[in-house]
Image: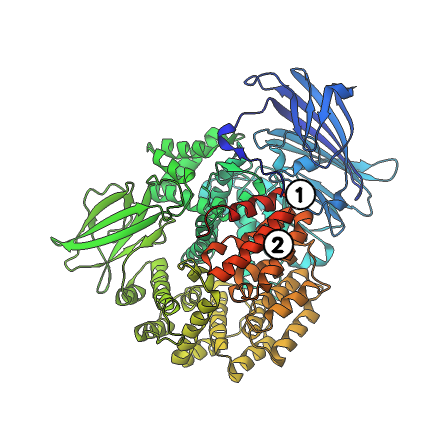
C-alpha cells in the first residue's frame, strides 16, 4: 500500500511564508498545458527563518525565478511532492512555469479534461497538481487568472471573480482575464474552459445590486437548467431573509461537468457541479432528483459565507464549513418542502451512513485528530453528524440566539481562516453562555447512548437519564451536552407540564427540553393528573441512540397520538423493528406476525390528515442495512427473507387499501408538493404490492411503465419489475435503455435499477453490465451507479455466500486504485462492516481486504483498508 504517514492536528503550525497575491496564466492544451504563476510572498514574522515550502505533484518544472532572476539549481530542491526555495528574501516575487497533462489526469483532482472540456477540482489538495504553491487553507491570497486557448475548441473560458479583460493574440488564440477581489485559499480556485452554453438570469440583492446568474452546460443540455437557476435564486433570497447574508460579486456561475468525484464544489463565484445536481427535466429526473438539485445548489451557494468568506484554518476543521453548511441547507429545504419529511430523511441518512461509520473502523470525531489522506475524511461524520452538532447550538440557544451567534462569527472572522473553537466561542459570547462542554462533541468518536428509566410517583413523572459510549472498543467517554426535547402524552395527545428547576426557554407549555450534561441526571415533570406516556428526543433533538423500553401497545399509541411528526414516524419504525428483529433472531423460518402490528399498519393507511410524503415514509419498513446495525453475526439472507415475509403479511392483510392508494392517483405531472406527495404514496404502494409478485402485480407495474409521463413513475415501475425475471422486466429494461441511451444521467439510473435487483440471476447480470459498452471506470457517476449501488444497497446479492459479490467489488477497487484513488477508497468502504457478519462471510470479506492491501498502492485505499483490517476479529 501507499505511504501511510499520518498528519496530526496537535502538530499544526502556521506557514513560514504568506502569499498576498497570485497571478496565474494558463496556456491550455490537453496534453501540455503551461501554467505560469507569479506570487507576491512575504515571510511570516511569527515563524523562524527557513526555506519557502511549496507543494507540487506531477508537475514538470520549466523555470523558477525570484524577483525576475532565474534561480540556480543550488537554490532550490524539487522532490516528488514539494519544491523548496532556500534563503528567500523577506519579501519577494516568485515566478514558476510548469507543464501539466490534463488529459492524462484520471484522478479528476487538479486540472483535467472531461468530454473535451477543461475543468478543475482543487479541494482538498488538488491545486498542487496545477502549480507549485503552499497548498493549505490558511494561506489566503487574491487571485487574477489569464486563460489562453484555441477560440474554436474553447469558446468559453471561466475562472473565479469578475471578467475584467479579453482579447485575441497574434497567433489567433483568444484570452480572457478574471480577477477575484476577495482573498481565498488555493482549494477555492477554479477554471473551466470548453464548448459550453449558458442559461442566464438575474438576482437583485436586498441592497439593490443586480447579480448576473449563469448556468453553464454542454449545448445538448441547455433545456435542463431552469430548475437549477430557480433553485439558485431561491437560495440567495432565503440566505438574505434568514441570515442577512448578501452575495458579494457581480456574477455567480455554475458549471455542470459529467466527470466529477464529488457532488459539487463551492469555488468562489464559479461553482463546479456534478451534472447530476444541475440537469433536470420531468422526463429525465425524478422528484428526489429535483429536491436534491435544489438542496445541493443551496449548499454550494451558502458556502459563499460559511466556507469562502470565513474558511478553515486547516483540514482538521473541515466540519467548521461542511457541518455548518449542511445544517443551513437542511433548514432551507425544510422551509421549501415539508419540515417533518425533511427531518426524517436527514435522520435516516444519519443513521444509515453515519451511525454505521461511528460503529466501524473509520470511526472518528467530527474534528479528526489525524489523517493519512485528507480525501478520506469527506465523511458522513464530518458532514452529517457535524450538521447535527451545529443543530445542538440552535437547540440550546434558540433560533434567535443562534442567529446572534452567526452574526458575531461573521463580524469577527470575515476574511479569515479559523477553527471550530472560534465558532463555538462566537456562539457563546453572543449569548453570554458558557459552551465549553460542547468541545467534547468535537473530540470524541462514536454515537452516545442515552438510556431512560421512568417512574410515576407523587403525581409526577420522574425521568432518569444516563449517557454512555456504545462500545468498549472506543476510548473513555466524557459526557456531552444532550438536549432531550420532551412532551407528555395523555389519552387525547400532548398535555401541559412543568419541569422542576427548568432553565431553558420553551415555546409552548406541552414541550420542554431537558439538558442532559452529566453521566446521569434525573428530571421531575409535574402537571398531568394521570401517568402520561413520554415522547422523548422529539424531532430527533440530538444525534444519539435512545434506549427506552417500550412495548408494542405504547408504540401504537404514540403512532396514533403523538403530535411530533418525527416521533410519530419513529414509533411506527420501532414497531416495524420489533417485529422484524424478533423474526430474524428467532429460529422459525415462517414466524407469525404480531396482529397488533398488522392492525396498526392498517390504521395508518386509512388515517386522515397525514401528509402524503410522510405517509409514504411510514409505509416503508426499516432497510436491511438499518436492521443489520442492530445485529451481530449478521446473516443478510435471513434479514432479507424476514423483511420480505413481513411485507408479504402486510400486503395480504391490506391489499385493498394499498390498491386504493395506488388507484386513487391522478397521474399528475406537476412538480408541486401535493403532486410529489401523491406520486410518493402511489409508488410506495406499487412497490409493496410488487413484493407479492402475482401476475396482476407484475402487470400493474408493466402498465405503469407504458403510461408513465414522468421519470419518477417510469423509474418506480422499473424497480417494481426488477426482482421478477420475465418478459415484462426484460422488455422494459431494453426499451428504457433504447430511449435514453444518449442521456448519461438516465443511463446511470438504468444501471442502478439492475444493481439493486434481488432476482436469482442478479450477479450474472451485474458481471455482464461491467462489460457493457456504456460502462466506464473513468466516470465516477457510472461506477457509483453500478458497483457502488450494488455493494452499498443490495446486501442480499452483495453478500452472496459464493463470494462473487465481494469479488466484483475487489476487482473494481484494484482497477480504480491507479485510475481514481478517491473513488476507489469510497468503494472499498463497503467492506468496513465485515466484522459484524457471520463467520463465513466475514472470512471471505477479510480475504478480499488482505488481497487489496497487498496490491493497492494509493494512500486513499491504503488508509481505509488498513483501518478495516486492524484490531480484533470480533
Residue 133 appears in which quarter of the rendering? top right
Instruction: Give the answer, above or below, for where 389 lies relative to 839.
Output: above
User: For residue 278, which numbered disc appears in the image?
Assistant: 2
Closest to the observer, 838 or 317: 838
Of mark 2 and mark 1, the one earlier in the sequence is 1
Q: From the viewer's perspective, is 43 left or right of 774?
A: left
Q: Which residue is mark 1?
A: 109
Relative to 812, residue 722 above or below: below
Residue 358 at x, y = what percent?
44, 48
335 vs 205, nearest the viewer: 335
Identify the residue shown where x is 29% and y is 41%.
517
Could you tell me which secondary element the residue under label 1 belongs to?
loop
Residue furthest to the bottom: 695
- Quarter-of-image position of residue 779: bottom right
Q: Which mark is residue 17?
A: none
Circle 2: element type:
loop
Q: Is residue 560 left or right of residue 241?
A: left
Rendering colour mode: rainbow
Within 10 Å of the Cα at label 2, are there few (<14), some (14-19), or many (20+) other Cα atoms? many
Amino acid at each position: 500500500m501507499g505511504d501511510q504517514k499520518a498528519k496530526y492536528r496537535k502538530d499544526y503550525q502556521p506557514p513560514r511564508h504568506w502569499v498576498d497575491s497570485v497571478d496565474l496564466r494558463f496556456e491550455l492544451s490537453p496534453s501540455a498545458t503551461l501554467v505560469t504563476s507569479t506570487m507576491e510572498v512575504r515571510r511570516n514574522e511569527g515563524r523562524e527563518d527557513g526555506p519557502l515550502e511549496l507543494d507540487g505533484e506531477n508537475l514538470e518544472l520549466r523555470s523558477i525565478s525570484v524577483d525576475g532572476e532565474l534561480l540556480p539549481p543550488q537554490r532550490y530542491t524539487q522532490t516528488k511532492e514539494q519544491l523548496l526555495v532556500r534563503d528567500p528574501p523577506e519579501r519577494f516575487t516568485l515566478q514558476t512555469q510548469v507543464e501539466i497533462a490534463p488529459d492524462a489526469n484520471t484522478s479528476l483532482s487538479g486540472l483535467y479534461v472531461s468530454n473535451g472540456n477543461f475543468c478543475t477540482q482543487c479541494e482538498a489538495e488538488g491545486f498542487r497538481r496545477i502549480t507549485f504553491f503552499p497548498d493549505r487553507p490558511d494561506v489566503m491570497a487574491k487571485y487574477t487568472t489569464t486563460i489562453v486557448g484555441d477560440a474554436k475548441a474553447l469558446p468559453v473560458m471561466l475562472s473565479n471573480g469578475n471578467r475584467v479583460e479579453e482579447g485575441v493574440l497574434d497567433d489567433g488564440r483568444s484570452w480572457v482575464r478574471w480577477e477575484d477581489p476577495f482573498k481565498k485559499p488555493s482549494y477555492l480556485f477554479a477554471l473551466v474552459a470548453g464548448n459550453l452554453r449558458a442559461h442566464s438570469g438575474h438576482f437583485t440583492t436586498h441592497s439593490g445590486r443586480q447579480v448576473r446568474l449563469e448556468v453553464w452546460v454542454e449545448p445538448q443540455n441547455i433545456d435542463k437548467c431552469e430548475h437549477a437557476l430557480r433553485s439558485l435564486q431561491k437560495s440567495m433570497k432565503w440566505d438574505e431573509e434568514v441570515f442577512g447574508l448578501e452575495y458579494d460579486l457581480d456574477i455567480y456561475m455554475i458549471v455542470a461537468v459529467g466527470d466529477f468525484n464529488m457532488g459539487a464544489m463551492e469555488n468562489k463565484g464559479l461553482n463546479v457541479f456534478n451534472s447530476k445536481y444541475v440537469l433536470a427535466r420531468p422526463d429525465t429526473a425524478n422528484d428526489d432528483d429535483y429536491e436534491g438539485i435544489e438542496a445541493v445548489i443551496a449548499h454550494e451557494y451558502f458556502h459563499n459565507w460559511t466556507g469562502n468568506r470565513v474558511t478553515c484554518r486547516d483540514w482538521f476543521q473541515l466540519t467548521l464549513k461542511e457541518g455548518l453548511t449542511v445544517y443551513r441547507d437542511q433548514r432551507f429545504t425544510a422551509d421549501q418542502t415539508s419540515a417533518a419529511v425533511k427531518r426524517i430523511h436527514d435522520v435516516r441518512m444519519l443513521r444509515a451512513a453515519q451511525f454505521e461509520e461511528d460503529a466501524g473502523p473509520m470511526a472518528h470525531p467530527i474534528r479528526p485528530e489525524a489523517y493519512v489522506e485528507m480525501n478520506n475524511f469527506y465523511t458522513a461524520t464530518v458532514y452529517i453528524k457535524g450538521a447535527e452538532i451545529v443543530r445542538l447550538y440552535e437547540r440550546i440557544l434558540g433560533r434567535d440566539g443562534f442567529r446572534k451567534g452567526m452574526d458575531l462569527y461573521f463580524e469577527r472572522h470575515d476574511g479569515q481562516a479559523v477553527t471550530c473553537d472560534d465558532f463555538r466561542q462566537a456562539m457563546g459570547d453572543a449569548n453570554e453562555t458558557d459552551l465549553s462542554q460542547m468541545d467534547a462533541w468535537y473530540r470524541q468518536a462514536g454515537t452516545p447512548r442515552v438510556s431512560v428509566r421512568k417512574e410515576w410517583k407523587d403525581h409526577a413523572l420522574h425521568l432518569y437519564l444516563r449517557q454512555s459510549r456504545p462500545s468498549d472498543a472506543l476510548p473513555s467517554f466524557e459526557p456531552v451536552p444532550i438536549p432531550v426535547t420532551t412532551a407528555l402524552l395523555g389519552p387525547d395527545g400532548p398535555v401541559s407540564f412543568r419541569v422542576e428547576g427548568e432553565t431553558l426557554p420553551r415555546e409552548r407549555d406541552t414541550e420542554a427540553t431537558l439538558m442532559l450534561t452529566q453521566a446521569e441526571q434525573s428530571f421531575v415533570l409535574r402537571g398531568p393528573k394521570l401517568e402520561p406516556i413520554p415522547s422523548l428526543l422529539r424531532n430527533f433533538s440530538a444525534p444519539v441512540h435512545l434506549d427506552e423500553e417500550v412495548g408494542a401497545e405504547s408504540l401504537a399509541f404514540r403512532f396514533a397520538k403523538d403530535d411530533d411528526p418525527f416521533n410519530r414516524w419513529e414509533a411506527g419504525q420501532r414497531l416495524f423493528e420489533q417485529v422484524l428483529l424478533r423474526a430474524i433472531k428467532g429460529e422459525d423460518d415462517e414466524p407469525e406476525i404480531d396482529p397488533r402490528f398488522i392492525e396498526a399498519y392498517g390504521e395508518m393507511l386509512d388515517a386522515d390528515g397525514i401528509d402524503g410524503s410522510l405517509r409514504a415514509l411510514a409505509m416503508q419498513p426499516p432497510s436491511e442495512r438499518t436492521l443489520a446495525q442492530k445485529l451481530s453475526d449478521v446473516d443478510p439472507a435471513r434479514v432479507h427473507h424476514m423483511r420480505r415475509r413481513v411485507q408479504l403479511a402486510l400486503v395480504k392483510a391490506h391489499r385493498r387499501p394499498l390498491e386504493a392508494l395506488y388507484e386513487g392517483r391522478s397521474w399528475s405531472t406537476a412538480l408541486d408538493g401535493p403532486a410529489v406527495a401523491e406520486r410518493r404514496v402511489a409508488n410506495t404502494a406499487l412497490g409493496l404490492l410488487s413484493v407479492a409478485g402475482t401476475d396482476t402485480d407484475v402487470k400493474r407495474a408493466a402498465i405503469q411503465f407504458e403510461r408513465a409521463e414522468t421519470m419518477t413513475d417510469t423509474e418506480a415501475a422499473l424497480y417494481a419489475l426488477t426482482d421478477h425475471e420475465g418478459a415484462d422486466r426484460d422488455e422494459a429494461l431494453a426499451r428504457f435503455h433504447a430511449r435514453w441511451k444518449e442521456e448519461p444521467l438516465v443511463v446511470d439510473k438504468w444501471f442502478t435499477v439492475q444493481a439493486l435487483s434481488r432476482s436469482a440471476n442478479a450477479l450474472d447480470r451485474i458481471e455482464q453490465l461491467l462489460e457493457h459498452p456504456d460502462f466506464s471506470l473513468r466516470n465516477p457517476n457510472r461506477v457509483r451507479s453500478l458497483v457502488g449501488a450494488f455493494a452499498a444497497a443490495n446486501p442480499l446479492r452483495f453478500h452472496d455466500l459464493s463470494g462473487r459479490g465481494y469479488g466484483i467489488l475487489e476487482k473494481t477497487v484494484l482497477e480504480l486504485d491507479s485510475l481514481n484513488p478517491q473513488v476507489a477508497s469510497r468503494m472499498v468502504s463497503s467492506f468496513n462492516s465485515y466484522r459484524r457478519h457471520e463467520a463465513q462471510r466475514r472470512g471471505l470479506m477479510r480475504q478480499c481486504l488482505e488481497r487489496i492491501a497487498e496490491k493497492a498502492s494509493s494512500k486513499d485505499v491504503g488508509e481505509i483498508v488498513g483501518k478495516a483490517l486492524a484490531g480484533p476479529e470480533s
